[in-house]
DNA sequence: TTGCACTTTCGCAATATTGCGAATAGACTG
DNA sequence: CAGTCTATTCGCAATATTGCGAAAGTGCAA
């Protein structure tokens, strides 16, 4: 109440301050969630770009539509390299993995 | 016997022709093996660059040295995104994943 | 040679991911 | 409306990855 913070710009910023700012563990979870979401999104984009249905892609990699659906769910946390490679292979892509340094802002 | 191939340059090329050329399944396995080897190598390099022993890195990510050793084994096929992220996180890196189109040479 | 730190290999239990069918929901068309 | 195609959710078995200790293999220095 006291410290007179300058007013937050919007709801997102308010929520960020309340739940994440200065809480490394939560920030880490947030980053993981974003990373998973990104992968799900890429899989969906790749499939869409190839103009395939979930069932068609599933058959290409030897599994079922429900599995593809699970992979494209942004909340899915079980992404594996093996599955990414299977999908990439079916769509004539390869998976590149890079480790990128993070500059920590103290 | 007949077709009069021009002589192969070296043993590697001979072996390549005998076992891989024109055999997509084997080429795919070869590519996977190379990808796994590359990841193992990167993990090792990252750890070396951070000047950590396997035991030290293991403690950073909450596991044991034997696990790290397994990951750095070039023949290991079980690399997972989860583990790569744990290692990256401990070493202040992030894992970037990209799908890259393969130009198929017919 | 011994000691010491580090690495590697092995086996098995614990956990996580995948396989897959069934049921449901949504969108679109005739 | 029914019919069709697509997407989503659920549960559980099958497979894959991880956890972890014990034992043995390296390399180096005293």
Image (spheres, coloured by chain):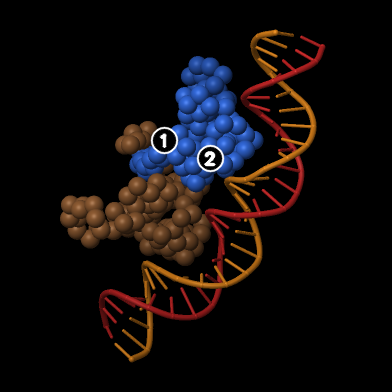
Chain colours: A brown, B blue, C red, D orange
Rendered position, B31 above or below C25? above
In the rendered image, the residue lying farthest to the front is A2
Q: Mark 1 — on which chain does it sit?
A: B
Q: Residue at x 42, y 63 (%)?
A: A69
Q: Position of residue C15 (x, y in %)?
A: 60, 54
Q: Residue at x 47, y 37 (%)?
A: B90
**Helix, strand or loop for disc 1:** loop
Residue that mark 1 sits on = B92
Quarter of the rendering occupied by the C terminus of chain B: top left
Is residue B21 visible to us here?
A: no
Rendered position, D28 above or below A30? above
Q: Sequence-wise, which precedes: disc 2 or disc 1?
A: 2
Rendered position, C21 above or below B7? below
Q: Which quadrant of the figure has residue A103?
A: top left
Q: Is residue A51 left or right of residue B35?
A: left
Q: Position of residue B19 (x, y in %)?
A: 57, 31
Compute the Cα span from label 2 to label 1: 12 Å
């Amino acid at each position: 109440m006291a410290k007179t913070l300058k007013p937050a710009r919007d709801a997102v910023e308010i929520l960020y301050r309340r739940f994440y700012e200065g809480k490394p563990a939560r920030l880490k979870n947030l980053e993981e969630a974003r990373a998973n979401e990104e992968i799900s999104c890429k899989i969906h984009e790749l499939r869409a770009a190839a103009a395939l249905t979930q069932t068609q892609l599933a058959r290409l990699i030897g599994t079922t539509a429900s599995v593809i659906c699970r992979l494209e769910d942004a909340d899915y946390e079980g992404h594996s390299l093996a599955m990414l490679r299977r999908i990439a292979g079916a769509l004539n892509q390869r998976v590149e993995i890079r480790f990128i340094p993070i500059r920590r802002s103290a």
